[in-house]
Amino acid sequence: MIEATVLDNKKPKRPCPAYQYFSAEQRKVFKVDDPTVKATDLSKKVAEKWKGMSDSQRGPYDKQANADKKRFNAEMCDYIEPPKATKSGKRLGKDPMRPKKPKTAYLFYADKVRPGIAKKHPGQGVTMLAPILAAGWKLLSERERKAYQTQAEKDKERYQNAMKEYTPGPVYIAARDAFVAKRDQAKHGDGASAETLAQITSLTAENKELTKANAEQAKELAKNAKTIERQNEKIEKLGERLQKKKDKADNPEKQAKAAARAAKASAKQQANQEQQSYLQWTRSVWGEKGEKASAELKRVRDTEGDLGLAKHLAEMYRVEMSSSGKKRSAPAAAAEPAAAAEPAAAAEPAAKRTKSSPTPKKQKAPIDVSPRASRSGSSKPGRGRPAGAKNKTKKN
């Protein structure tokens, strides 16, 4: 608790200089010699004698002055000057024991750079330097302001902690009561009794405290209202998000479309896998240029041609997959390029065919080597017929 250590509101007597001690002593001497001497003449004589004294002669008086100065400084350490009324007389000054209000980040910045700016602009007053300080503050980045903001936060914390322990001292309370009594006396006239004025003062102080409490509650309510508004916005957004998910889950049409897309993607992936598997198998039994072909495959190509070879390869793939338990057939998409003019050309990856390769001669159209083609033996497109061939109809 911060309290005044001196209850008396009388300010300590100021220290006397060495000349004053000398003057008091010499006046008595001059009056004994000449009782009729005038005060003005006496002062002149004392001053002339003081001027003619050496430092060693002034020493005793200097010691008295230094001792009195120490006495004054010691008393001033414990003295608290009571607040006075403002110039308007409408309110009392601040309590000198009240903690100093915290400084802002800008004030910390101004205190640091003001001396350097004052040197660059000699002769300029505070009002002339204020625009320069403000312009410099605006040019600071957030990173540069961070140091001053940290200082301001620490000072604010210091002020809040000090205000928790602060209570008005007896000197300030006495001055406040005297000021209020004098003000009420002037307002209500000299006819008001002391008891009535005391009640007025008490009620006024109570109303002031209640008004302050209401203001703090209103501030807290406004803060809570903003918090509620922000939370309601979050709740609304979360509700909309949940509703969208629910609508999406409850819509059969959207579910059916999503399932169809998933099934189509799965079928496409499976077809690609089957095509790659068939092409790899074709390379394993034929090779790139027929170097892995068995005598049987070479005989089939020589005797039955490309179409016969394609059918034979498809049948071999079916038999091998059936014996392994995979139950796969040669995919049509993968079989179409597999039976070109030469089966090895179908097995060769498309990425290896660069633009620099010479333009091949006109070859036969790709042959469908799918199991469907091998079963039908037809020459129509999709049924064993070279792809891209046109239907020739007889004219009647």
Image: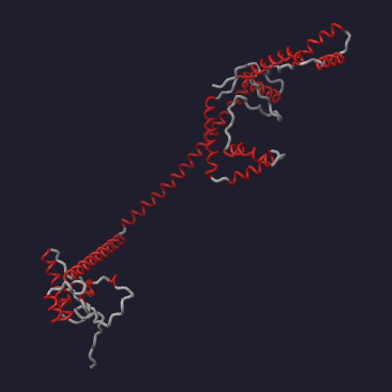
Q: Provide residue 193's location: percent of width, then percent of height.
A: 67, 18
Q: How many callouts does the rendering have?
A: 0
- In the displayed structure, 106 sits above or below 180; it is below
Q: Does the image show residue 197?
A: no
Does residue 89 appear left or right of residue 164 in this picture? right
In this view, the residue farthest toward the top is 32
Q: Nearer the viewer, residue 395 or 115?
A: 115
What scheme was used to colour the molecule? secondary structure
Q: Provide residue 254's location: percent of width, then percent of height.
A: 31, 61
Q: Quadrant of residue 174?
A: top right
- In the displayed structure, 337 sits above or below 206; it is below
- In the displayed structure, 27 sits above or below 205; it is above
In this view, the residue farthest toward the bottom is 396
Residue drawn at x 82%, y 14% is 49
Q: Does the image show residue 175?
A: yes
Q: Quadrant of the C terminus?
A: bottom left
Q: Provide residue 65's location: percent of width, then percent of height.
A: 71, 15
Q: Quadrant of the N terminus?
A: top right
Q: Quadrant of residue 355?
A: bottom left
Residue drawn at x 52%, y 32% is 157
Q: Quadrant of residue 46?
A: top right
Q: Provide residue 70's location: percent of width, then percent of height.
A: 66, 16
Q: Nearer the viewer, residue 124 or 97?
A: 124
